[in-house]
Amino acid sequence: MADDKFIIEGLAINGQNTAIYGPPNAGKTLIVMHGLTEAVKDGVIKGSNIIYVNADDHGRGAVDKIALCEPHNIQMLIPNENGFESRFLLPLMYAMIEKDEARETIIVLDTAKKFMDLMDKKDSSKFGTLAREFSQAGGSVIVLAHTNKRRDNGELVYGGTSDVVDDFDCMYIFDTVGVQDGIHTIEAKNKKARGDVASTLSYQYTRVKGQTYAELLGTVKPLDEIQLEFARETETVRHRLEENAPVIKVIERHIIENNKLEVP
């Protein structure tokens, strides 16, 4: 049995499989990398036990992330670099299970669609079975995937069939609460849980022009419930101001004109 410890605080437990869904630019990669590097710094996990497969990045982004991983001994694999191809991953996982090398190993797939057809039940189920065998051998799998473009009653919906969600231990959906002055507020809602994971997690990070990925990562901070509620209220006020901007301008103009009038 693997120790019941968090490999990403509050979000992912050692020996479990975790699926993280969200729209593009919702901070999935950033939050996962932040959580893993913090766990390495705290001595909870070893960086050398992490295999991060970055299959959803451009050249500069991949280089920046590799530079960030190297000091922590995190192995980052890039498709079509140094002889690695996406098709090698599943056979590698099978081999690690057979050789009893999966224990304590954490595999991150960014993103899932590069390694399975999320719209195909058979293909998704096959990967889910492999991920379960990997976790039963003492490893952990974290997959990042996208949500559908359309919401259901305001809520984001995971993309693809339900097989990954059905076969995995935990599933979170990341959503953007608001963006103001470069400060992004993100909320992660748990939709399936096994173990003592959080029902809701929230984070903020600050994106400014010209910053490196390491600098961006350094701005990530978790929020408590009070801070999240404040961010929600601030976003609500901002939306109201934007929606009512024409009316507000008319009122401001009348106030200014009325102030010019002489009162007898």
Image: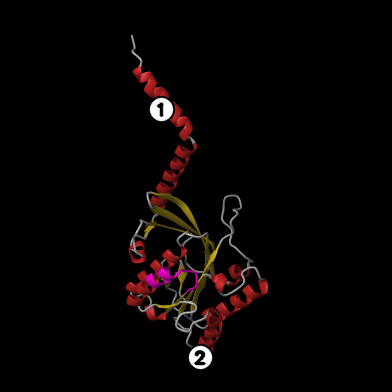
Q: What residue type is labelled 1?
A: Glu
- Residue at left offset 34%, top offset 64%: 212
Q: Residue 11 carries which label?
A: none
| Residue 213 in picture, x, y percent from top left | 37, 65
* Lower position in the chain sequence, tag 2 or tag 1: 2
Instruction: Using the rendered view, name the quadrant where residue 44 is placed.
Output: bottom left
Q: Which mark is residue 99?
A: 2
Disc 2 crowd rating (10 Å Cα; few below 14, some 14-19, many 20+) is few
| Residue 122 visible in image | yes
Q: In this view, does 186 lie above or below 246?
A: below
Q: What stretch is highlighted in magenta?
A: 54-64
Between residues 163 and 250, which one lies in front from this camera angle?
250
Q: Which amino acid does label 2 sit on?
A: Lys
Q: Mark 1 points at which residue?
A: 252
Q: What element carries label 1?
A: helix
Q: Is mark 2 on a helix, strand or loop?
A: loop
Q: In this view, does 251 lie above or below 182?
A: above
Q: Which of marks 2 and 1 is in front?
A: 1
- Residue at left offset 57%, top offset 50%: 154
- Residue at left offset 54%, top offset 66%: 145
| Residue 46 visible in image | no
Between residues 60 and 15, which one lies in front from this camera angle?
60
| Coloring scheme used | secondary structure
Q: How far apart are marks 2 and 1 (CA)?
A: 73 Å
- Residue at left offset 44%, top offset 26%: 251
In this image, 18 relative to 69: left or right?
A: right
| Residue 170 in picture, x, y percent from top left | 53, 68
Q: Is residue 249 above or below residue 9?
A: above
